[in-house]
Amino acid sequence: MKKDEHVVVIFPHPDDEAFGAAGTIARFRKQGVPVTYLCGTLGEMGRNMGNPTFATRETLPEIRQQELMNACRSLDINLEQLGYRDKTLEFEDQDRLATHLFRYLEKIKPTLVITHYPGYAVHPDHDAFGAAAIEAVNRFEPNQRPEVWALAIKKDKEKDLGEADLQFDITDTFEDKLAAIVAHKSQASGILGGLNQGPASLDQIVKDKLSHEAFYQWSFNEV
Amino acid sequence: MEKIKARLIQDYLNQFVDRPVYIHLETTNGAYATHHNREAYNVGAFIRNAQVTFSQAKISGDEKSYRVGLKTGNGWVYAEGLRDYQIDQHKRLLLAGHDDQGRLLVTLELSLQPFTN
């Protein structure tokens, strides 16, 4: 571990960290690197209400907040809840979002920021928060600026972006990732169930689909 | 939530008539509809804490798909595809429809107090 290493993960929803980056996060934790999750919303607009349903639109935020705390405890990472509302991030002022994020980054002084790749992250919140995160990082002087690893989700992303620069086989931290996913009880069964399209066991599908994490290294072009 | 019992819901709706009521109305096919199915596209509408006063409220349909319509001073509010209900500890009436995997498709909620933002 390099001196003063600190990873900040910036995603809008409870469970984005688990599905998208938990294997990588767990690897950093095993190396003793502190990780802080800046979580934008409480996923108030999630559609998964459990199966059979145990949440309502009104109880979901509290349930997901608890799940988020459980997942962060299981990954052993710090959590900051930023208090926005699910599905509204793209309608917020991006400059203000960036300022809000920059205030955290200024204080934490991370060496690496993991966020969504704007325009390639499918959910409007992902795109908007990723763009704000990158704008926030861009406010650092180039010699102070943390690296950015951007997570793209869109199908056919390789057509535009090429292969991801960073490809991680996270088999060695897969159990940590699975524990983080399962902590998001209200969402896990719905999303994992959606992956189960064939005769293979769910465990195997999950392992195949989720044992690989990939990120694009963001390049800040100085003008 | 429990399966809607039409008479019980009608009784409860009647208690909101001619009083300023906060509503939450939403329908969605999810943020990943296009992602999972190229032929589909994302559709949704959402309004929270709109205050309406209605002179009539009616539930119709059957357990497959109940509909609730509210007749306001100069318009209407309605929701379709409702199957489940809950009257919560704040005496709010929550009505919703879910798919076979427990995913919310539509919800109409009525409250005399504003919903938390």
Image (spheres, grey):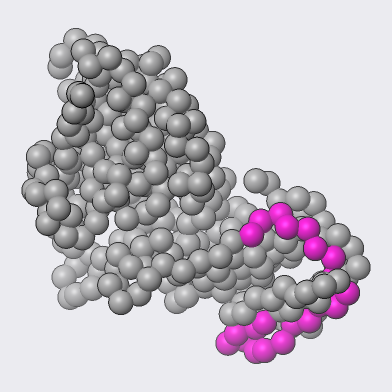
Is residue A185 visible in the rendered image? The answer is yes
Report the magenta residues as a range.
B47-67
Residue at 34% of width from left, 39% of height from top?
A130
| Pick the front one: A23 or B71 | B71
The stretch drawn in magenta includes residue B57: yes
Which image quadrant: the N terminus of chain A? top left
Using the image, determine if residue B29 lies above or below residue A167.
below
Using the image, determine if residue A164 lies above or below residue B55.
above
x, y percentage for residue B20?
86, 60
Residue at 49% of width from left, 51% of height from top?
A87
Residue at 40% of width from left, 52% of height from top?
A124
Total label count? 0
Using the image, determine if residue A87 lies above or below residue A136.
below
Toward which corner of the image does residue A2 lie, by quadrant?
top left
Q: Residue furthest front?
A: A223
| Pick the front one: A26 or B112 | B112
Is residue A171 visible in the rendered image? The answer is no
Q: Residue furthest bottom?
A: B62
Q: Residue furthest top?
A: A3
x, y percentage for residue A205?
18, 62
* Magenta stretch: helix, strand or loop mostly: strand
Which image quadrant: the C terminus of chain A? top left
* In the image: residue B87, left or right of residue A95: right
Using the image, determine if residue A22 lies above or below residue B110.
above
The stretch drawn in magenta includes residue B17: no
x, y percentage for residue B8?
78, 78
| Pick the front one: B26 or B92 | B26
x, y percentage for residue A162?
9, 49
Toward which corner of the image does residue A186 lie, by quadrant?
bottom left
Residue at 72% of width from left, 87% of height from top?
B60
